[in-house]
Image (tube, grey):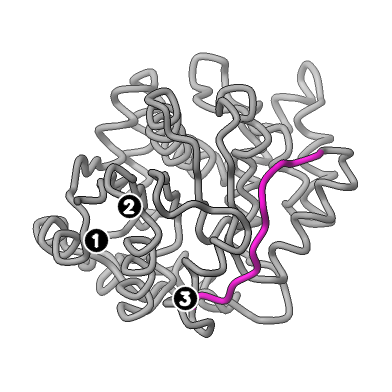
Amino acid sequence: MLDHRPSFTAAFVAACRGLTPMLPREARLIDDPLGLRFAGPWLTPLARTLLSARGPLRVAAQGALLPVLPWVVYMQVRTRAIDEALLAFVAEGGAQVVILGAGFDTRAVRLAPRLGGARVFEVDHPATQARKAAELAAAGVTSDAVSLAWHFERDPLAGLPARLAELGHDAARPTFTVWEGVTMYLSADAIAATVEAIAAYSAPGSQLVFNYVREDMVRSPGLLAGAAALVVRAAGEPFRTGFDPAALPAWLSVRGFRLLRDDDFDTLATRWLPAAWARLVRRGRRLILVERSALSERTG
């Protein structure tokens, strides 16, 4: 990403989460009332106006938002998968959460009543962290999350465990690490170094959940997904790296993690959404670089 401004893709993802009210109730998997605050100075008021419309105007408004509908549904699936894994970890007694590449993630706020007092550490680029803090303050929202500014391609990742420890993280206790929608933007070396740093601060029984795209999709995304890739490249956040699902268990194993689950989004959409909306996720393959959600556990 560009050093002088917050992440473009983080703002887009937050906007998609915030647009959930455009969906019928049976197709809503999450609720993120803060998401639209990060959408940008022109999209935020426009989206709020459209979503508050009634009658025929609301129908027209939803038509105006139709191009982003597949992304809205898609991001719900991605977010729900991570939320469920995180809450299961907390329900079993986990009390530490690290969110890497946190972007405009609002889990520390929207899931607060269900986190049971677990301490949340948010790690991301300084410009994105500053924008997030400003927007939360403007909304009058207080977050208990501990913020750590970090540049994943420049700051030496070997130092991450020590920095977290300075902020109160206890490496002797299990930690749940969220790495949502990040790996595809990093180099292979940065991904490997990050996972090794996660292993260094993760006691046995800790868990790591992350999204990734298949490496063949990065190499040959197709016409529409290729167009999306060009957009994020122009914003300074190009797709760089994908994984081969068959090779992922061994890749994680040599870095101290055991793969517990590796779900494709089609399966998750079919499990959680009404049939028509699940089909929208499947059809979105032409537009979106299809991601998978992997959950792994730190071995002893």
Residue denoted by label 2: 290
Q: Position of residue 126 (x, y in %)?
A: 69, 71
Residue drawn at (73%, 80%) of the image: 4
Magenta stretch, residue numbers: 142-152
Label 2: which secondary element: loop
Name the residue nearer the viewer: 236 or 286. 236
Q: Position of residue 254 (x, y in %)?
A: 14, 66
Q: Can you say whether 235 is above or below 70 in the image? A: below
Which residue ends up furthest to the front in the rendered image?
172
Residue denoted by label 3: 238
Label 1: which secondary element: loop
Q: Position of residue 28 (x, y in %)?
A: 53, 23
Amino acid residing under circle 3 = Pro
Amino acid residing under circle 1 = Arg
Q: Position of residue 183 (x, y in %)?
A: 38, 65
Residue denoted by label 1: 214
Amino acid residing under circle 2 = Val
First in sequence: mark 2 or mark 3?
Answer: 3
